[in-house]
Amino acid sequence: MSRIAIIEKDKCQPKKCNYVCMHYCPGVRMEEDTIVIDEKSKKPVISEELCSGCGICTNRCIFGAVNVINLPEALDEPTHRYGPNSFELFGLPTLKEGTVLGLLGQNGIGKSTIMNILSGLMIPNFGDYEKESSWDEVIEHYKGSALQNYFKALANKEIKAVHKPQMVDQLPKVVKGNVKNLLTQVNERDKLDEIVEDLDLKNVLDRDIKNLSGGELQRVTIAASILRDGDFYYFDEPTSWLDVRQRLNAVKVIRSLADAGKSVLVIEHDLATLDAMSDNIHILYGEPGAYGVVSGNKGVRVGINAYINGFLQEENVRIRKQAIEFSIRPPTPEDDGEILSEYSDLRKEFEGFTLEADAGKIYHEEIVTAFGSNGIGKTTFAKILAGEEKPSEGEILEKVEIAYKPQYIVSDFDGTAQEYLFENAPTFGTNIFNSEIGKPFALNDLLDKKVKNLSGGELQRLAVATTLSQDADIYLFDEPTAFLDVEQRLIAARAIRKIVESRNAASLIVDHDIVFIDYISDRAMVFNGEPGLSGKASKPTDLRTSMNTFLKDLGITFRRDKETKRPRVNKYDSYLDREQKEQGEYYYLKEN
Ligand code: ADP
Ligand code: ADP
Ligand code: MG
């Protein structure tokens, strides 16, 4: 094991601490300084030759910017390093014609770095960050491997790479005009009508891009990528803000690229979607912010199972202490529980939209998930429960306090995350806040950053954490998983569970990640109907019944993986798909 200290540049604030790490570094008092100030950035840099990894600087840094890491012995030279004491990436995946390759790993572990290298936006430096890197060296480096031909062709512009970026909400800043014009301009494969149909974009064609919702922007961006004529396609998180039907439509169009002989790479944190979309996957492991290693190529089922079990056999690497456990919960008896909130049949009329909800109860200490298409009344229902909207008919029999995290989080707060928490999180700074919320959501890493500059996942953590710090009876989350990686989704699920139980409260969670829903739900409610026209909400009931109703409506069946019990989408018209439809068991058959 070699040990090195890493300084994360965006966390390091020497002006505020007066170079504490330097003062305490034992090496700095000897002949050659282990920690010196970098002239350009005015930030300390640790000599990787002299540093013994004793960890004193780590303990002194109040911003958590210094991190001593153990690099596994077996690693070769890095593929890329951003600078001294900065993140390094080991390995690159190789794409294959006619297949979809998935990338699975935590935020900050190097997935976008890989995409930027493979799509030609960035030339890898193999660890030598001081030298100007060149494609010639890259081609020489990969001599004799498939990547040599790839980079050769990429450097000579003989192949074209198409890239769908992660943050689609940036699109309106760079593209103006209406959707139809945009899509017509990029329609190089002459498939406009087909893709508009597949991604259900007909109704938004005449709309201005600046007026699209997040889910609409996502679908327009996916369409624009698919329509381009490339050889290699890169999709960075294509499903955030999409509902389940839209996610599976995205799977369909992305797979159609592979069927047309293209090579596709996808980053995706929704495990059911990743599973349905990919032929093979690579898992990225390491230390987020410090280093990331690309695993060997694995079949999609085996690879996702290994991730869930937390152990990569071929690499002999443990990526998590415990496996993620999926339990097949027996249906909860109807009257089992102490009632927290109760409502009669409800009806809400807006101009052009009607929501009806069957009478239902929410119990103390339970987590109820709600799923259904976008635009079908989930948020409206939540607002009625919260007393923000008055129902046109019916009433809330047990009134409750609701803490609410909306789907789209506003980030125009002009200040740091710490200032945001001071203003919005009543218990911020207390011990209980730190242990129940601060630690699981790793808020210390965010405190000094401007809210405006937070990444999607960071903003989501801040918003979920703020909601959990309110004093409420029902904690309501509208798509809390967007932009979180699998580990963060899991941690959020556990934190919500713990708080709901310790406060004798309940939680209602609207989400579209089926694996997450399966993991977190005690009970569930389904919204059916015509998006934008009418919605019908079932009463909260057991997950299996709710899923069955929901999936029947979508015409999709799921099975459970034999090994890990995680839900997997059945191939359309496969033997199991037909058998389950015949038996009316859309979620899974009783015996598996
Ligand atoms: P992921 O896509 O898996 O979330 P990224 O590839 O975006 O991860 O980033 C991996 C690490 O590299 C992060 O710690 C990030 O802060 C760092 N990083 C990304 N771009 C740069 C850069 N231009 N300079 C220095 N560090 C960077
Ligand atoms: P979901 O949360 O399932 O995506 P919403 O409850 O946000 O759906 O919206 C359902 C429908 O109700 C949408 O067509 C929306 O335009 C409409 N709607 C929501 N709030 C209002 C309102 N205050 N006035 C008029 N229409 C509304
Ligand atoms: Mg909504």
Image: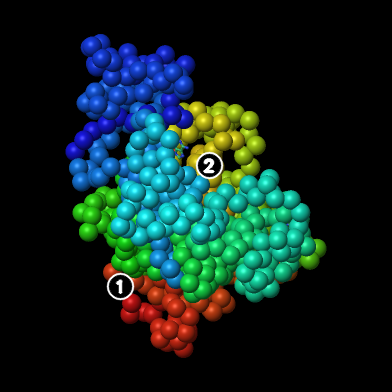
Nearer to us in this view, 13 or 47: 47
Nearer to us in this view, 291 or 541: 291
Q: Disc 1 and disc 2: Cα gap in Å?
A: 36 Å
* Total numbered badges shown on the rendered structure: 2
Confirm if mark 2 falls within 8 A of ligand 1.
yes
Residue occupied by mark 1:
562
Dot 2: what SS?
loop
Q: Earlier in the sequence, mark 1 or mark 2?
A: 2
Q: Residue at x 40, y 66 (%)?
A: 96
Nearer to us in this view, 200 or 525: 200
The amino acid type found where label 2 is placed reads: Ser
Q: Residue at x 33, y 77 (%)?
A: 592
Q: Is residue 185 left or right of residue 9?
A: right
Nearer to us in this view, 435 or 358: 435
The amino acid type found where label 1 is placed reads: Lys
Residue occupied by mark 2:
455
